[in-house]
Amino acid sequence: MATLETPLSSLLTSELDITPGTNALADADRITLVPDAHYPYHPSSGVVTDPAVVGATVAILERRIDGEVVVAGRSDDTISFERTAEYLGYESLLERFDADPVDLASEGHTDTRVTVGDDTVSTLVPSRLTRSTVVTMPSLRPTETGRVAGGLRTLAAMLEDGTDETDASADSRALGAARAIDPALSVLDATTVYAGEPYAANTLFAGPAAAVDAVGTSLLERSFEADDVVRRAFDDDRPSITVTPVGVDPESFDLESLRAALPTGGLPPADDTPAPVTAAYRLYAAVSGDVVPPQLEGGE
């Protein structure tokens, strides 16, 4: 956290100008941080938003604003957010601050209708996200379909009405959620990246959610045009994005060099885990009380 506070402070104070009357974050009564927080021992990427990035962000915001800060996630059929937060260390982390983890699945939802292209999309959005200033905090990793996870899809994962990315309506729901929630900012944690294998990129990005997702798409060498969520999220005026590298000289930072340095690849196949590993993990889970990783649930 100590290492991360300096670059994050630069992003959240100087370059984004969090001063009263000039920025939505500065005047917010409640800020809800939505990190990429899922079961961290998943046998695919296992990459989540680094809790230290979340903690440093909470620390900076609490020093600079008077509003409430919470960290939100959502329970699903696989694991409760309370347990995920415990695995990620959120409980002990947030005890240092006046911030709490919040399970959006246990709160009310608002039925929102948003125009996406020629369609009207109806989504059940957590009411907290429509009543507070939202900051998405995705990690840099691909999804199961190969596209960037990103802040827009992180928001979509909070919806009540499902986010199966193979569903034909998933893209419209993701866009509808983004427009209904209208996040004030996205902070992309690229301190550790997954692209076929993990890589320590030691970089943070911040800016509008669509712009940050577009940069993530480029860094993972995915097609911008093929990603309907990111492509359709842009208005006519494409916003700028601030880049702050962590632990290196900003003057020497080069986005092209970072892209070239990242591994190239996606997630391993869901059936790629050897049967003895699956059996051993299930035995361990039964004895320890841990959960079976989602990708092993469907194995024989």
Image: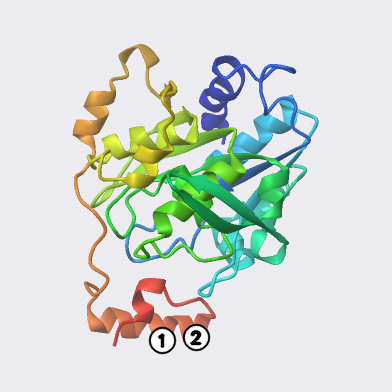
Vertical side of 16 occupied by 230: above or below? below
Percent from the top left, x then y, of residue 49?
48, 47
Q: Residues within 10 Å of mark 1 (few under 14, many from 20)?
A: some
Horizontal relation, residue 212 to residue 105: left or right: left
Q: Quadrant of residue 179?
A: top right
Picture disc at residue 287: 2
Residue beneath the point at 24% across and 83% down: 275
Identified by mark 2, the residue type is Val
Q: Quadrant of residue 280?
A: bottom left
Identified by mark 1, the residue type is Leu
Closer to the camera in the image, 182 or 137: 182
Picture disc at residue 283: 1
Q: Is residue 106 visible?
A: yes
Percent from the top left, x then y, of residue 159?
56, 59
Vertical side of 143 occupied by 208: above or below? above
Closer to the camera in the image, 83 or 285: 83
Vertical side of 89 occupied by 18: above or below? above
Residues tagged 2 and 1 counted as in contact (Cβ below 8 A): yes
Closer to the camera in the image, 101 or 216: 216
Residue beneath the point at 34% across and 44% down: 193
Vertical side of 253 occupied by 209: above or below? below
What element does badge 2 sit on? helix
Q: Residues within 10 Å of mark 2 (few under 14, many from 20)?
A: few
User: Alpha carbon of mark 2 to alpha carbon of mark 1: how far?
Assistant: 6 Å
